[in-house]
Structure formats: C-alpha cells, structure tokens
Amino acid sequence: MKYLVIDNFIDESLCKNLVSSVKNLESELFSENIIHNGRNFISCTSEDFLKLKNSNYFWKDFSTFLESKDFAKFSFSKLDLKIDSYEFINLYKSGELFSFLKNKKRYNAQNINNLSSKRIIWFLLLRFFQRILLNLRLAKYFFLNKNPLELLFDFSIAQNGYSLPIHRDTDARIVIFLIYLNDVCENSKGGNFNIFKLKENKEFFPKNPNPSECSLVESIPPKMGRAIFIDGSMDSYHSVDEMINHNEKRYFIYGSFTSLLKRNDSIDHKKTEKYDTEFNLYE
C-alpha cells in the first residue's frame, strides 16, 4: 500500500470558482445518479460533464490539467510507480464514436423505468455495438508490450448519509486520487477518508475485509484543495465514515488511471478475489 496526502494541491480561489459554477447548474446536471447512500456524480464522459466544461472556463482548464501527461507523470512519480510500460489513450472519452452511439449517452442519464420497451431494446443494441467498437480499438494492445491506460474520473457531491465500508479499489485501477473542493462545517461528523491495514500478515487479501480484521493507519478529513493519491494494490484498504450533521454538501473529484485491459501488476488473483471495474459508468 502506498498513499500520499498533498495540501493546497489546487488553490483556494480555483476551488471556490469550480464549486460556485457548479451550484449555478446543479439542478440541471445532477438528477438520479445516487450511490453509496448520498453521493451524486457525473462522469467525465457524460454529456452533463461536457455541458459543465463548455459553460465555464475554470472547469475546462481544470479538466485539461487533469487529462495532461504532466498530471499522470506526477501521480505515478509521487507513489514511486513506473509509467513507461503504459500507453495513455482516450477510449471512453474519445470524440470519435459513431454519431448513433452518442444517442446512448442520453439514455444513460435516464431512469430505465421511464423508457418504453422499444427504447430499452434500442439502448441495449446501442450498448452491444458500443462494446464491440471499444473492444476492436483495444485489440491491438493484446499483441503489444504496452498497457493502455485512460484517466476516468467523476465530479461528485456528497451529503449526509454518504459512507463507504472498508474496501480496496477495483482491479483495473492503477492510481486512484481524490481532490476536495470545499471545507466541511465545524460541528459536522464523518466524511473522513480512512486508511487501513490488516492487523495480521495474511496470504489472502479480501476486497472487503471485516473491520475487526483491520487497524486504522490514518484518518484524513476533507479540506479545500487537499488531494489524496493511493495505489491500486490489493492491500490499499480505505473507507469513508458516514457524513452526519453536515450543513454543506461536499464537492470533490474522484478518479483513477485505469487499465483498459484490466492488467494490474499489483493484483495477484491467487491472493485476492476478482473485483471488476464498472466501466459501464463511463460508456
């Protein structure tokens, strides 16, 4: 397990501008993508995120920074990870999808209960063809000595009730990061990012260990401009304790440099369960 906390990773002024621009569009952009009992998100590949970037130059510039090779090099170097064996590509973020597949992104944001039977069938067909196209673009990497990586991230808003149990991240995530965009109120409880290790050395690393098997290494409270980087190894255990009595929502970026071939040298499936990455969130 490797992790690093960096304060003032982005300055206070940028954080405030990013948050204020979202608040102006929050009712339009965030609807039904609720996960983990109180986290709402839009993925970097969604039409809503594109709308956010196009409406505000702070978000456009910040996204450009995150997607730069310099940010990738920085993230890997800070965790002492080699970057040479990876090739950075845009697959899910590619603007080259056939025009008929762009219609699928509109369906992604809708509740399936609101779609007619014909629309559901059309959605499933689009998803089928999209995955064929994605796999065709990846096919060449099976024969090359390169591991294709893509930065996949989302912008999230968390509120009271949000929590995450102790877990490691999914197999395809090589480097994971969080960037907090605002502070939390003084009288609130929970919302900390907690780092754990197993109490005993084991030959097997469960993806969701029992809390009784773990000891706390560090509890990291959210703070404006604070960034947390963590490697995607099978013992990189972390959690978020439940947010209680928060008067303000928590705004943050969650992302990872993700192996599109699901190759992660830090994961040995003889020592841990398979844990699939939810690529469908970015389709």
Image (cartoon, rainbow, N blue to C red):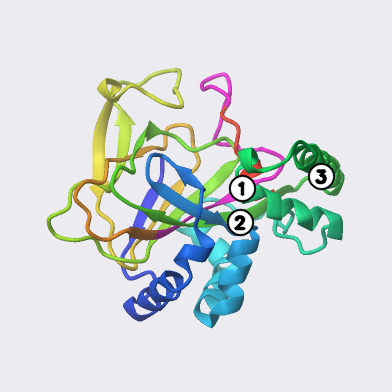
Q: Nearer the viewer, residue 141 or 155?
A: 155
**Amino acid at circle 1:** Thr
Spatial distance from mark 3 to mark 1, Cα to Cα? Answer: 24 Å
How far across and how far down the image is residue 129, in percent?
A: 85, 43
Residues at badges 3 and 2 in contact (C-beta under 8 Å)? Answer: no
Residue 267 lies within the magenta run:
yes
Residues at badges 3 and 1 in contact (C-beta under 8 Å)? Answer: no
Q: Is residue 239 visible?
A: yes
> Magenta segment range?
252-274
- The answer to whether residue 107 is above or below residue 207 is below
Name the residue that disc number 2 marks.
151
Name the residue that disc number 1 marks.
258
Residue 234 lies within the magenta run:
no
Figure quadrant of residue 22: bottom left
Majority secondary structure in the magenta region: loop
Residue positioned 30% across, 21% down in the render: 200
